[in-house]
Amino acid sequence: MKLVVLIFIYCTFCLQAQNTVGLLSHSQTSIYDGYNLLFPHNQSTVYLINNCGEVVHSWTDMEPTVPGNSAYIIETGQLIRCKRLQTSAVNDPIWAGGGGETVEIVDWDGVSEASFTLNDSLMRLHHDIAPMPNGNVLMIAWELKSLEQSVEAGRNPALLDQDKLWPEVILEWDPTENVIVWTWKAWDHLIQEFDPSRGNYGVVSDHPELININYDEHDGHPDWLHINAIDYNPTLDQIVVSVPYFNEFWIIDHSTTTEEAAGHDGGTSGRGGDLLYRWGNPKAYDREGEQQLFFQHDVHWVSSSSGSESSDNGRIVLFNNRISETLSTACVLSTPLSADGNYALDGNTYGPIDFDRVVSHPADPRSVSNSLSSAQLLPNGNMLVCAGRWGFSYEITQEDKITWEYITPIKAGSPLDQGDTTLSINNNLTFRIERYGKDFEGFANRDLSPKGFVENAPNEEFCDFLITNTVDTKVNDFMIYPNPTTSSLTIERSIPDDATLDIYDYSGALIRRQYISNYLVDLDLRWLAEGIYFIRVDDITSRFIKL
């Protein structure tokens, strides 16, 4: 009788049409409140959306541009975006995935206030930037080196498939004066043991502070390093970069002059522009040790994304892409940072031996992405993760419960209709998602009221429906989550006695029965069609939604 009454109550309203793009799930009780910045590929608009998937602000470029690739809001409310003309790609002298061209600063209303463009036969901006507290911006660029220059530096000619290399350069741009005020070049910090008659000759394993010019995991392609993320730590005055073709990240000293950055002395560290620290793949500096990183993205300090205090300055967050064909994870690790800002080797390699925290979506295969992607440690301890190849973002709690899910509702650069089911991998590429808390300084006195949705024909009541009717259910120490769910459901109960678990559809028909005897039960619901259902265990009935 109890079940019949519940069914009657819940059938007095119709289940909203299930979202297939945009917002998929929202658990109000454990989500971190704020606004999400998205810059999807193949179009020119940067979106700021609330946790209901509603657009609260956007910046649309007047030129025919696309991401190149990241965007940030800074405390002044200005947007800094990386972009390139739609036509500046494969026919340009320097081109690879992540290629950019222009870094532009615009005000809240989209009016351009400063820009810097670099895309010619010798250098090209790409991937990411790091806004600095002094108003300057760190930028990544490829730098062309010819066959002759590469061989002279000790590169094995067999690893020069196109007779050139594009090593990395970091440029610090002062937008007020529109000048480059500091430069670091990977080319100044090389080592090789291939040819004793050429430059940079030495024993690679004796010099972890240097970059082995003959370590290659890109089949001789000139995009040898492919730095895809950069971050700046103002407390340490250090820079971290992600080097996916080395499967590691590097930390360098920013306190140097440009002259010191080109050498091996100077700066706070006394080591010039040499690597202060590297982690992820000891093989890259010819040491024995376990590889931990696999074509990682979005490497940054915890303090950059969570508002943490300086005690977190040694902690790093990243997205670990290619652990296997079926697994990508978001990770946090603690570097061996000393009080003086240096990093000591732990015997043969740099520590740590493992991550502090590793998270992944418990069920959805769209959480696996072999490139792009991001991870953000939120102030409440949750992780916000974007699997970029699928445009699939999710928030996961410290208890590994999914509390928010969102699919970028864009295909080939154009908004989709809600309900569309044609999206597949690479259709809605999303480089990164970042959430800013509602108290973020840049939002002061800004209009952040809802202004529609990214998708067309939106289900405008869906978020209210989720918040009102689909919080995690807990009755008499009986709990189910996540709710709504896409593919799995976890049941927690206070006693492990044998019990019958029944699932009913909203008409009251029994569709599945099984027997359980544990405190914690995980149900695979991929077989279940979308809709409202009821689960009954220990004479307790709860309602859940399958998306």
Image (tube, rainbow, N blue to C red):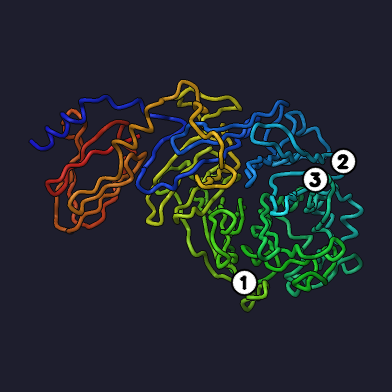
Q: Quadrant of the C terminus?
A: top left
- The residue shown at (83%, 44%) is 178
> What amino acid type is highlighted by mark number 2?
Ser
Between marks 3 and 2 in the image, the one whose residue lies nearer the viewer = 3
Label 1 and label 3: CA atoms lie apart by: 34 Å
Helix, strand or loop at label 2? It is loop
Tell me which label, 3 or 2, sits earlier in the chain.
2
Q: Quadrant of residue 262?
A: bottom right
Tell me which label, 2 or 1, sits earlier in the chain.
2
Q: On the picture, is 131 further left or further right than 403?
A: right
Q: Quadrant of the N terminus?
A: top left
Vertical arrangement, residue 522 with respect to residue 301, above or below: above
Q: Does the image show residue 219?
A: no
451 or 514, which lies in front? 451
Q: Residues within 10 Å of mark 2 (few under 14, many from 20)?
A: few
Residue most extreme to the front:
445
Label 2 and label 1: CA atoms lie apart by: 39 Å
472 or 213, which lies in front? 472
> What amino acid type is highlighted by mark number 3?
Thr
- The residue shown at (67%, 75%) is 340
Residue that label 3 marks: 176
Q: Quadrant of residue 66?
A: top right
Residue that label 1 marks: 337
Q: Residues within 10 Å of mark 1 (few under 14, many from 20)?
A: some
Residue that label 2 marks: 121
